[in-house]
Image (spheres, helix red, strand yellow):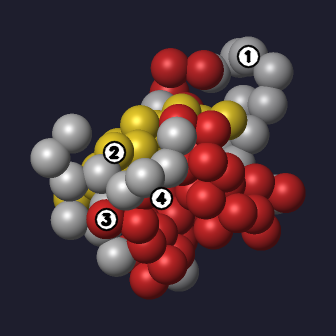
């Protein structure tokens, strides 16, 4: 069974073909806080570099990531920190 982290990584790789991608499960940092689930897998950080971000501002880049992960954002993901850059940035 795929973890939520694996699902995030798979969807981003398929949709945005990143040069680099790092997905971190930060759930342990939020234990006991709102939205934290038993067993974690609720709070994530994404650091992604993709040519799909060239010419887009920060908000448009975040929107692209959020649209790619729309299904997960409705369910298992409570919080997602995004660092999205184009190659060379």
- Residue found 82% across the figure and 57% down from its top: 75
Residue underneath mark 3: 51
- Mark in the foreground, 1 or 4: 4
Q: CA distance from mark 1 to mark 2?
A: 29 Å
Q: CA distance from mark 1 to mark 4?
A: 20 Å
Please report whichever mark, 1 or 2, sits nearer to the chain's N-terminal start: 1
Residue underneath mark 4: 5
- Mark in the foreground, 1 or 3: 3
Q: CA distance from mark 4 to mark 2?
A: 20 Å
Please report whichever mark, 3 or 2, sits nearer to the chain's N-terminal start: 3
- Mark in the foreground, 1 or 2: 2
Disc 4, SS: helix
Residue underneath mark 2: 85
Please report whichever mark, 4 or 2, sits nearer to the chain's N-terminal start: 4
Q: Residues within 10 Å of mark 2 (few under 14, many from 20)?
A: many
Q: Is residue 10 above or below residue 87?
A: below
Q: CA distance from mark 3 to mark 2?
A: 8 Å
Q: Quadrant of the C terminus?
A: top left
Residue 21 visible in the picture: no
Could you say where residue 32 lies in the image, as x and y percent from the top left? 71, 17
Q: Is residue 15 above or below residue 35?
A: below
Residue underneath mark 1: 33
Evaluate if marks 3 and 4 touch, with contact meaning CB atoms under 8 Å apart: no
Please report whichever mark, 1 or 3, sits nearer to the chain's N-terminal start: 1
Q: Is residue 18 above or below residue 24?
A: below
Q: Residues within 10 Å of mark 4 (few under 14, many from 20)?
A: some
Evaluate if marks 3 and 2 touch, with contact meaning CB atoms under 8 Å apart: no
- Residue found 20% across the figure and 54% down from its top: 87
Evaluate if marks 1 and 3 touch, with contact meaning CB atoms under 8 Å apart: no
Q: CA distance from mark 1 to mark 3?
A: 35 Å
34 relative to 2 in the view: left or right: right
């Amino acid at each position: 069974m795929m973890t939520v982290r694996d699902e995030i990584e798979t969807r981003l790789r398929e949709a945005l073909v990143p040069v680099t991608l790092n997905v971190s499960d930060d759930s342990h940092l939020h234990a006991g806080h709102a939205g934290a689930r038993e067993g974690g897998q609720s709070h994530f950080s994404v650091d992604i570099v993709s040519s799909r971000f060239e010419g887009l501002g920060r908000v448009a880049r975040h929107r692209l990531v959020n649209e790619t992960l729309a299904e997960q954002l409705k369910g298992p993901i409570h919080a997602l920190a995004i660092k999205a850059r184009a190659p060379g940035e």
